[in-house]
Image (tube, grey):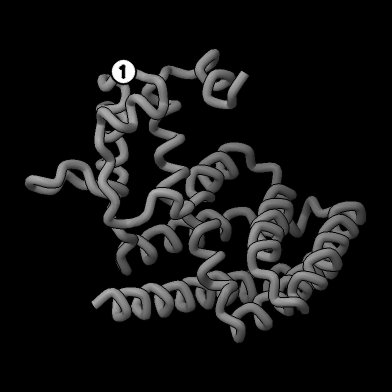
Amino acid sequence: MSTFEQMAESKPIREIAYETLKHAIITGEIPAGARIVETEYAERMHISRTPLREALRKLERDGLVEYVMRRGVVVRAFTVADVMEIYTIRNALEMLTLPAIIEKATAEDIADLREMLRQMDEFHQRGEIDQLSPRAREFHNRLTGICGMKRVLRVIESQDEYITRFSAVSIAKENRRHAAHAEHYMLVDYVEQRDLESFTNLMQKHIERSKETCLMALKESKLRRE
């Protein structure tokens, strides 16, 4: 049974179509500027055009696609405003979790985080971005998950695909990659020391630097296209 078929047993088809297309757009599998032809994608996903059309309307509300005259549905490129908004949301939510992380972190949590960083060291030294980027996201998810704030974590998770795409862009920049990896070690140190002030200050800077690097890469990409 395919993943799509397994999901269909518990979710409406329009939701599965939406989530499948959203993931493909955010990860770049369906690139910016590509057309999403209803008949083609309905056939590819083995669904009727009605749930696909509903999924496309939802993607339009998300700002991921737009209807263009004589072209139909087209995937939008991420804009500076998109990046700013998503990082603002992420920053605000992560700041809410920090006191609980400091309060609840156990010796086992610290050991797990340090082991994750040890594994990341090898990929960092070899500059293997494809391997390092997802592990950096796993590290952040493990760190944030310590807070145990289930509702906040669910909202953070809803933004996670965007951040995964952006962090891959950010970590590809060599200077930022070295600094970010060092900051990960410092974040764990502050959690172990129960130093909320230093932990909060560094986390704010960490997210802000990631955002600025992503914005820089976005602007460079736009200049290349022009």
Which residue corresponds to the image point at 38% horizontal and 73% vertical from the top-left?
218
Direction from residue 165 to residue 130 in the image, left or right:
right
Q: Is residue 112 left or right of residue 74?
A: right
As rendered, which of 222 and 144 lies closer to the eye?
222
Any part of residue 38 in sight: yes
Check disc 1: other Cα within 10 Å, few if <14, some if 14-19, many if 20+.
Answer: some
Q: Quadrant of residue 131?
A: bottom right
Does residue 100 appear anywhere in the picture?
Answer: no
Q: Is residue 165 left or right of residue 133?
A: left
Picture quarter containing residue 19? top left
Q: Residue 212, located in which quarter of the rendered image? A: bottom left
- The residue to which callout 1 is attached is 48
Residue 92, given in percent of the width and then of the height, sits at: 49, 59
Whole-percent x, y for residue 185 in the image? 78, 73
Residue at 54% from the left image edge and 15% from the top image edge: 10
Amino acid bearing label 1? Ser
Residue farthest top in this picture: 9
SS at mark 1?
A: loop
